[in-house]
Image (cartoon, coloured by chain):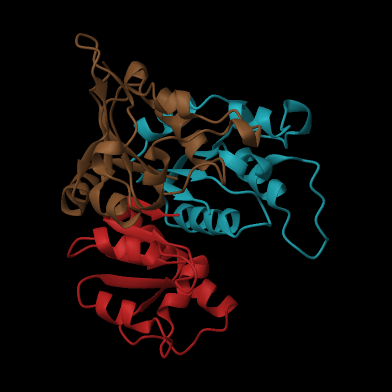
Chain colours: A red, B cyan, C brown
Amino acid sequence: MLHTVNKSLFQNGALENCLRLARDGDAILLLEDGVYAAAAGTVKSSLIEQAVKRFAVYAIEADLKARGLGNLIKEVRVASYGDFVDLVEKYPVHAWL
Amino acid sequence: MIISILVLEGPYNHEASDSAYNFIQAALAKGHAIRGIFFYDDGVYNVTRLMDPPQDDRHISRRWSELGATGIDMVVCIAAAKRRGITNEVLAPNIRISGLGQLASMIHESDRIVTFGD
Amino acid sequence: MAQKGKKVMVTVRKPPHGSIYVQESIEVMFIFATYEMDLSVVFLDDGVLALHPGQDTKELGIKGFMASLGALVDWEVTNVYADRQSLKDRGIAEDAIIAIGKDDDSGAPIHPRVLDAAEIAAMMAAQHSIVSF
C-alpha cells in the first residue's frame, strides 16, 4: 500500500497512526505539512529514521522547497508529483487525513 | 491506469486543491486517464465561479473548469453543495452537481482513487 | 444485500461533532451500500470517538448524526469495524461502544466488530479502493 500523510508531525498524530498500521514493504509519501517529518535534526526525526528501515519513504519536492527544507533524513527519497503518480500506479492508496 | 480524485477541502484555505491539481497534471502528462474528480465536504467550494483571487495568484475554480473542458467529469456532491450554498447559479463552467452515487461510479470505473483533504 | 463487486473501504479517523467529516462520511456509507460493492467501514484513531456511548448534540443546536450511525445496519452497512488500540487509548470500553443496528430476529443490538491493528492492516491491504475521512 501507499500511505499519504499531509499533517505536521509536531501537532498531529497522523504519521504515528499511519506507522502503526503500515506493513513491511509499504510506501509512505509525505506531502503538504507532512513533509516536516522528513527534516533531519528535529525532536521528532527518529520517527522517520526508524520508519525508513521498514518502508520506502518519499517526500514531495515542491512541498519541501515551499517550506525551505533541505537538510533531510538521508534515506528519505525526494519525489516529484510524477513519482507520486508512479507510486499510485504501483499501490492502492490510503490518505491519513 | 484510470484514476479518480476525491477533493475534501476548500480552496486557498488548505493545500489539498493544489496537491490534487498538481497530481492530476502529472498523471495526465504520463498518459493516465482521469475518470473523474469528485468534490465533497468543504471541497464543494472549489467550483464557484464567484471566486476572484488576486491576478498574480492561481485561480482555482478556473483551473478546475479548464480540466472539465478537456472532458474530465467534474462532479460536486449535491448534498454537500446545498448545505453550503453552492448551486448551479454559481457553478463554474464544465462542472456539474450530482449525487454521491457518482463517486461510487468513479470508483467502479477506475483503477485507483486518490483522496486529498485536511 | 449488495456484497459483490470491488472491495471498497471507508475509514473514519476524525473525531465527531467538532467538524462535519464523520457526518458526511456516514452519508457516503449509506450511498455506497446501495451500489454493487463489497463495502467495509473502519473507525480508527479519533474516529472511534464517534462510537462513544451517550453522545447528545441537542444543546449544541446541531441535529447530529447519532440516529444515522445507530441505523447503519438498516442501510445495509454491515461490515463495520473499530480499532482495539484506538478505543483503549481513549478510555472507551469495547463493550460500551454504541450499537449500529438491531438483529432482525432477536432484536439484539449489533455493534461494530473490534479488531486488532494487524487485522485492520490486512483488510486495508486487500481493498481495491479506500476513501478516508
Q: Name the residue nearer the viewer: C18 or B1.
A: C18
On the image, which quarter does residue A1 sit in? bottom left
In this picture, is A91 found above or below C64? below
Residue B74 figure quarter: top right
Q: Is residue C45 visible?
A: yes
Apparent side of residue C59 relative to residue C46 in the rendered image (left or right): right
Residue drawn at 45 percent across, 70 percent down: A80
Residue at 43 percent across and 87 percent down: it is: A42
| Count of residue discs | 0
Nearer to us in this view, A44 or B35:
A44
Check the image and report above or below for B55 versus C16. below
Quadrant showing the C terminus of chain C: top left
In percent of the image, x 54 and y 24: which residue is there?
B99
Q: Give the image quarter of residue A23.
A: bottom left
In the rendered image, residue C8, in percent from the top left (x then y), is placed at 30, 36
Quick one: quadrant of the N terminus of chain C? Answer: top left
- Residue B5: percent from the left, percent from the top? 47, 44
Q: On screen, B77 above or below C82?
A: above
Q: Position of residue B26 (x, y in %)?
A: 48, 59
The spot of residue C48 in percent (x, y) is 36, 45
Q: Nearer the viewer, residue C132 or C13?
A: C13
Of B1 and B107, the residue lying toward us: B107
Instruction: Tell me if I can see residue B70 in this picture.
Output: no
